């Protein structure tokens, strides 16, 4: 992450801040600060996952994206299947990922959800095992500092066995991004 943190407001004793001072001290729009969920999506169609590999999740159903940060195609500022933090809205975000896979057959399956920040693995949100003959599920959340207009995130799923995602309501792979603080 590159960029500059906002300057902390400094008010001289005896001189109360005026509305103009307050407006310059607030770095993000109030609508952004009062709306906690800034992005939420699911993968509703089956997606084939390669075994022993990190698979980029191609979320096909965007449920919430009030700031338009999601892009399923590459743009000049972000790659395909990524969410770009809104410009002027730097801060801490909680990123939640869930993943469910189909039955791997007679093998056990390791399943993990991984957050990628600016194209590199950032942190594993969760991991779980699927026993022989049963699908696996895993979910977790991670706090991440993002610079607005610059940092983007992607959801990845690691699976040991070559399987596909589920198409059952309630078991879709999901991603949710919530603003925590600036």
Image (cartoon, helix red, strand yellow):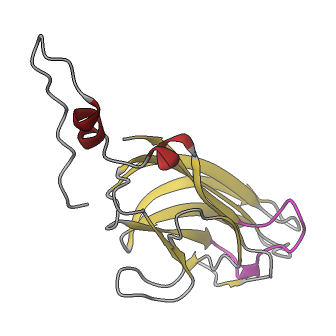
Residue at position x 62%, y 55% in the image = 127
Q: In this rendering, would 77 be left or right of 95? A: left
Q: Kindly indicate the quadrant of the structure image that contains residue 6.
A: top left
* Majority SS type along the magenta span: loop
Residue 16 forms part of the magenta stretch: no
The answer to whether residue 119 of the structure is visible from this angle is yes
Q: Residue 34: x and y, percent? A: 54, 41
Task: Please tell me which residue lies in front, 144 or 131.
Answer: 144
Q: In this rendering, would 35 be left or right of 21? A: right
The answer to whether residue 53 of the structure is visible from this angle is no
Numbered range of the magenta stretch: 159-173
Residue 162 forms part of the magenta stretch: yes
Residue at position x 53%, y 70% in the image = 68
Q: Residue 135: x and y, percent? A: 83, 66
On screen, residue 44 above or below 67: below
Residue at position x 19%, y 31% in the image = 9
Residue at position x 81%, y 75% in the image = 104
On screen, residue 5 above or below 136: above
Task: Please tell me which residue lies in front, 9 or 3.
Answer: 9
Q: Residue 149: x and y, percent? A: 34, 66
Q: Kindly indicate the quadrant of the structure image that contains residue 118.
A: bottom left
Q: In this rendering, would 87 be left or right of 100? A: left
Q: Residue 1: x and y, percent? A: 26, 60
């Amino acid at each position: 992450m590159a960029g500059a943190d906002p300057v902390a407001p400094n008010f001289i004793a005896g001189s109360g801040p005026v509305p103009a001072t307050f407006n310059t001290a607030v770095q993000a729009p109030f609508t952004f600060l009062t709306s906690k969920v800034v992005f939420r999506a699911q993968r509703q169609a089956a997606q084939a996952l390669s075994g022993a590999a990190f698979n980029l999740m191609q979320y096909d159903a965007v449920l919430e994206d009030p700031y338009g940060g999601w892009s399923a195609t590459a743009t000049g500022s972000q790659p395909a299947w990524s969410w770009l933090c809104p410009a002027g809205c730097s801060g801490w975000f909680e990123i939640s990922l869930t993943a469910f896979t189909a039955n791997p057959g007679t093998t056990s399956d390791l399943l993990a959800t991984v957050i990628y920040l600016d194209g590199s693995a950032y942190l594993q949100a969760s991991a779980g095992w699927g026993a022989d003959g049963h699908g696996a599920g895993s979910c977790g959340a991670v706090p991440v500092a993002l610079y607005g207009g610059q940092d983007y995130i992607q959801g990845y799923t690691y699976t040991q066995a070559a399987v596909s995602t589920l198409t059952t309501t309630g078991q879709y792979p999901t991603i949710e991004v919530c603003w925590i603080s600036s």
